[in-house]
């Protein structure tokens, strides 16, 4: 594998957490475009798994393991260095690579905190027992997070937006794969 990267198998619990941006500086550092406003998963893991960019130039193929020497916030962005990346050219060659981290290396969340990835795919049920749909994704509106819930109504696909705030969310049962909400089917 070129660039001094080591081929690896993607862990079964791998989660895509960002992608490599441009080279940063001359010593092999690179910018990371994190998919989360709070990129703790990037900071807590010393082993990242890279997959080639979906578009553009591909400087490697398959899955590569990257040994992270340091990842930190700098002027509002995430920057990182890795043992295998020792100069600007090597960092630039990673541009666009997708970054995955093993879910088991994520920091533990506090009570009533959830990783978005854990909520995707959960059934949303209201207090009356009506299934409102399945969480397709979450969206941050600045003031709050919103669940985007896919469902069918009269055979047609529909989408609901339910604020993910305690006023509307009664319970999140990760093991039972459902979210109980105070939300009506006709909202």
Image: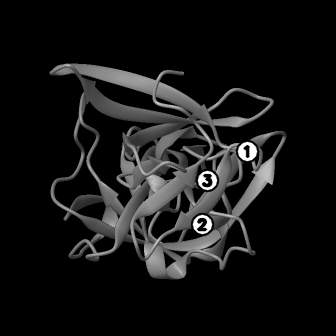
Which residue is labeled 1 in the image?
Answer: 165
Tell me what residue is drawn at x 34 percent, y 59 percent: 50
Q: Residue at x 74, y 59 (%)?
A: 72
Q: Earlier in the sequence, mark 3 or mark 1?
A: 3
Q: Which structural element holds mark 2?
A: helix
Alpha carbons under labels 1 and 2: distance apart: 23 Å
Q: Quadrant of residue 130?
A: top left
- Give the answer, above or below, for where 150 lies relative to 49: above
- Depth check, front residue: 11 or 118: 118
- Vertically, is 176 above or below 142? below
Q: Residue 29 has which mark?
A: 3
**58 or 143, nearer to the observer:** 143
Q: Secondary structure at mark 1?
A: loop
The circle drawn on residue 91 is none
Q: Of the residues tagged 2 and 3, which is closer to the observer?
A: 2
Mark 2 or 3, nearer chain start: 3
Left/right of residue 49 with respect to residue 7 in the rendered view = right
Q: Which residue is mark 2?
A: 41
């Amino acid at each position: 594998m070129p660039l001094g990267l080591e081929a690896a198998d993607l862990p079964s619990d791998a989660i895509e957490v960002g992608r490599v941006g441009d080279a940063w500086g001359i010593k092999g550092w690179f910018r990371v475009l994190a998919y989360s406003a709070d990129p703790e998963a990037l900071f807590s893991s010393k082993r990242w798994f890279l997959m080639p960019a979906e578009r553009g130039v591909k400087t490697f193929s398959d899955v590569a393991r990257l040994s992270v020497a340091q990842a930190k916030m700098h002027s509002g962005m995430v920057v990182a260095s890795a043992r295998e990346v020792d100069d600007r050219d090597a960092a630039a060659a990673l541009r666009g690579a997708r970054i995955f981290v093993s879910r088991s290396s994520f920091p533990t969340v506090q009570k009533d905190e959830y990783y978005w990835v854990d909520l995707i795919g959960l059934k949303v049920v209201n207090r009356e027992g009506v299934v409102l749909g399945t969480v397709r994704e979450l969206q941050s509106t600045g003031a709050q997070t919103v669940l985007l819930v896919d469902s069918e109504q009269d055979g047609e696909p529909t989408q609901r937006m339910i604020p993910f705030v305690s006023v509307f969310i009664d319970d999140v049962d990760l093991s039972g794969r459902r979210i109980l909400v105070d939300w009506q089917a006709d909202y």
